């Protein structure tokens, strides 16, 4: 995943880029000038605007939406009034954040939006190193081998691949893979993880799905 970080100040953008990199989101700095964007940045998976001039940046949101109808647009600012937030919503801005920033939360929502936007474009494939998850055909491939998965195993693998190298608390997994209103046994996640581990095997002398004691799990495809 590669997003465009759009800002007037490179130092400020660098701060945000470091926070996103820690959450495994790659980014490229794009200097904002005259509410326009360079053509090479239009191919990015998402646009993240670091706002210092709200009125001018609102125009940028509108320009981006005209050029890219489904690409996620994220707006970050020191503070945002309720009235201006409504204007951003009307301009089809997808996510709006003000300080204090939680990069783990921002990254999680960006990843989900990018996944949805790719689905709308017909790009229903998630890749993580040797793993390829074909959403339309419901098939997981490891290298050139098809790994047969049951429905819940597939949903679990999908969420893990959307969040590589990030510690996923058990509660977060339950809320995103199981219905949050469904009562499940305490060892349900462990059982599904164990079955999934056996099916996808290991790599580089380690398991791809690592247990983080007292917290949850981490998927490392490297």
Image (tube, rainbow, N blue to C red):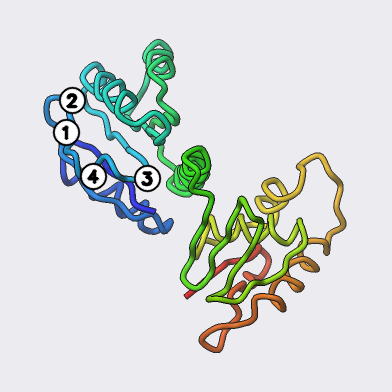
- What mark, if any, has residue 45 been given in the picture? 3
Counting residues from the start of the chain, the first of labels 1 and 4 encountered is: 4
Counting residues from the start of the chain, the first of labels 4 and 2 encountered is: 4
Q: Which residue is mark 4?
A: 13
Query: How far separated are the C-alphas under marks 2 and 3?
Result: 19 Å
**Is disc 3 placed on a helix, strand or loop?**
loop
Measuring 86% from the left and 47% from the top, which residue is drawn there? Answer: 183
- What mark, if any, has residue 35 been given in the picture? 2
Query: How far separated are the C-alphas under marks 1 and 3?
Result: 18 Å
The percent coordinates of residue 219 (x first, y second) are 57, 67
Q: Where, by quadrant of the figure, is residue 211 drawn?
A: bottom right
The percent coordinates of residue 171 (x first, y second) are 70, 51
Mark 1 or mark 4, which is nearer to you?
1
Mark 4 or mark 3, which is nearer to you?
3
Query: How far separated are the C-alphas under marks 1 and 2?
Result: 6 Å
Label 1 neighbourhood size at 10 Å, few (<14), some (14-19), many (20+)?
some
Do the CB atoms of the residues marked 1 and 4 lie less than 8 Å apart?
Answer: no
Mark 4 or mark 2, which is nearer to you?
2
Q: Is residue 64 above or below residue 11?
A: above
Q: Which residue is mark 1?
A: 32
Do the CB atoms of the residues marked 2 and 3 lie less than 8 Å apart?
Answer: no
Task: State left or right for residue 151 relative to residue 123.
Answer: right
Label 4 neighbourhood size at 10 Å, few (<14), some (14-19), many (20+)?
many
């Amino acid at each position: 995943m590669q997003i465009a970080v759009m800002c007037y100040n490179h130092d400020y953008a660098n701060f945000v880029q470091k926070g996103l990199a820690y959450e495994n989101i790659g980014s490229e700095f794009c200097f904002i000038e005259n509410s326009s964007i360079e053509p090479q940045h239009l191919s990015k998976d998402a646009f993240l605007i670091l706002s210092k001039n709200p009125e001018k940046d609102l125009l940028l949101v509108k320009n981006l939406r005209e050029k890219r109808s489904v690409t996620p647009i994220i707006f970050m600012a020191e503070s945002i009034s309720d009235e201006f937030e409504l204007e951003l919503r009307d301009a089809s801005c997808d996510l709006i954040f003000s300080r204090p920033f939680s990069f783990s939360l921002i990254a999680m929502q960006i990843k989900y939006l990018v996944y949805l936007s790719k689905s709308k474009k017909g790009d229903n494939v998630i890749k993580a190193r040797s793993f390829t998850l074909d959403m339309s055909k419901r098939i997981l491939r490891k290298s050139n081998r098809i790994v047969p998965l049951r429905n819940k195993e597939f949903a679990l693998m999908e969420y893990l691949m959307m969040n590589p190298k990030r510690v996923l608390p058990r509660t977060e997994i339950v809320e995103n893979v199981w219905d949050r209103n469904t009562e499940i046994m305490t060892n349900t996640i462990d059982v599904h993880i164990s079955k999934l581990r056996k099916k996808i095997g290991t790599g580089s002398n380690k398991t791809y799905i690592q247990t983080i004691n007292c917290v949850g799990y981490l998927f490392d495809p490297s």
